[in-house]
Image (cartoon, rainbow, N blue to C red):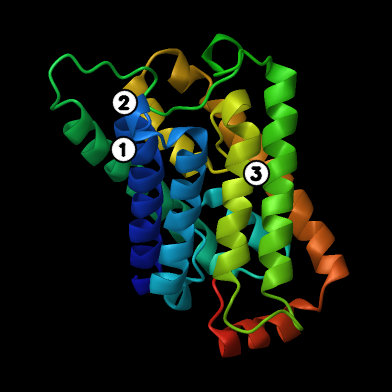
């Protein structure tokens, strides 16, 4: 229960903080945060929660991360479903609170409410194939970085920093393409409040991140130390994975 609660709050913070920067701050050009600010907002949510609750649950905050780490032998079977449920619920509540705040402004228009999409719903009008490849590839490297930075020989206690910066880089690459998901829970919360086609396109932002994550996990299982050795090291470090 403590692990699931940590995942709930971590995913709430990621969705509220990252999407909040896009919905509340980036909507005002005079503030000047733009894509760069939104990218850093997402990275900072992961970085801060990795150190706040990563020692409790491992700091996944993302169903794709949970399944990728399971594929890598880093997440026990019994944790997978509770984690994913907690992550989705946290994202939905984060999106709900953000919606309550954002809609309190007179004349506010959701403009997609920081949701993800392809085709006409892509910020840059990228097609389905481009968006699928983008989400799959970037999630692959996200999991690869997570496993690598928490493996034997990595700097002790610093895993949250490269993981957070990896998410910043991922957003700088893919905000124009898909508005950046690499996280099915993060996609689900805002889409439920944006409604319409954003909900019907959710399948891509579950499928591509999960496939990319599990492929990376399988690769990492072969490349890095055996799971039983790595798990001991991660517990000793208190690293966020």
Q: Position of residue 95 (x, y in %)?
A: 31, 38
Q: Which element is circle 1 on?
A: helix
Specify the label residue 210 is tagged with. 3
Determine crowd level at label 3: few under 14, some 14-19, many 20+ residues with C-alpha closer than 10 A. many
Residue at image coords 67%, 35%: 135
Visible residue check, residue 73: no
State if disc 2 and disc 1 touch (CB < 8 Å): yes
Q: Quadrant of the N terminus?
A: bottom left
Q: Nearer the viewer, mark 3 or mark 1?
A: 1
What residue appears at the point 32 percent right and 35 percent down from the top-left corner? 25
Task: Give the spatial CA distance, label 3 vs label 2.
Answer: 23 Å
Choose the circle earlier in sequence order: 3 or 2: 2
Query: CB atoms at circles 3 and 2 under 8 Å apart?
Result: no
Secondary structure found at label 3 = helix
Q: Residue furthest right?
A: 222
Residue 182 x/y as whole percent: 59, 42
Residue closer to the observer: 211 or 96: 96
Relative placement, left or right, of 226 versus 210 is: right
Q: Mark 2 — residue?
A: 193
- Mark 2 residue element: helix
- Residue assigned mark 1: 95
User: Relative to residue 20, is residue 51 drawn left or right?
Assistant: right
């Amino acid at each position: 229960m403590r692990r699931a609660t940590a995942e709930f709050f971590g995913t709430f913070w990621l969705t509220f903080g990252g999407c909040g920067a896009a919905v509340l701050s980036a909507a005002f050009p005079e503030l000047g945060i733009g894509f760069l600010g939104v990218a850093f907002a997402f990275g900072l949510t992961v970085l801060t929660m990795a150190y706040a609750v990563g020692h409790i649950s491992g700091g996944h905050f993302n169903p794709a991360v949970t399944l990728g780490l399971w594929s890598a032998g880093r997440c026990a079977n019994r944790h997978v479903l509770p984690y994913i449920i907690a992550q989705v619920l946290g994202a939905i509540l984060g999106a709900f609170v953000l919606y309550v705040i954002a809609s309190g402004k007179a004349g506010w228009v959701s403009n997609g409410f920081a949701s993800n999409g392809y085709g006409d719903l892509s910020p840059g009008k990228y097609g389905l194939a481009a968006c699928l490849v983008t989400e799959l590839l970037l999630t692959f490297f996200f999991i690869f970085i997570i496993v690598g930075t928490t493996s034997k020989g990595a700097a002790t206690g610093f895993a949250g920093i490269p993981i957070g910066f990896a998410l910043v880089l991922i957003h700088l690459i893919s905000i124009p393409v898909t508005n950046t998901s690499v996280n099915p829970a993060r996609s689900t919360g805002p889409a439920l409040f944006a409604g319409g086609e954003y909900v019907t396109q959710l399948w891509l932002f579950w499928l591509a991140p999960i496939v990319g994550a599990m492929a990376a996990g399988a690769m990492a299982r072969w490349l890095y130390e055996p799971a039983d050795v790595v798990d001991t090291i991660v517990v000793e470090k208190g690293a966020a994975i």
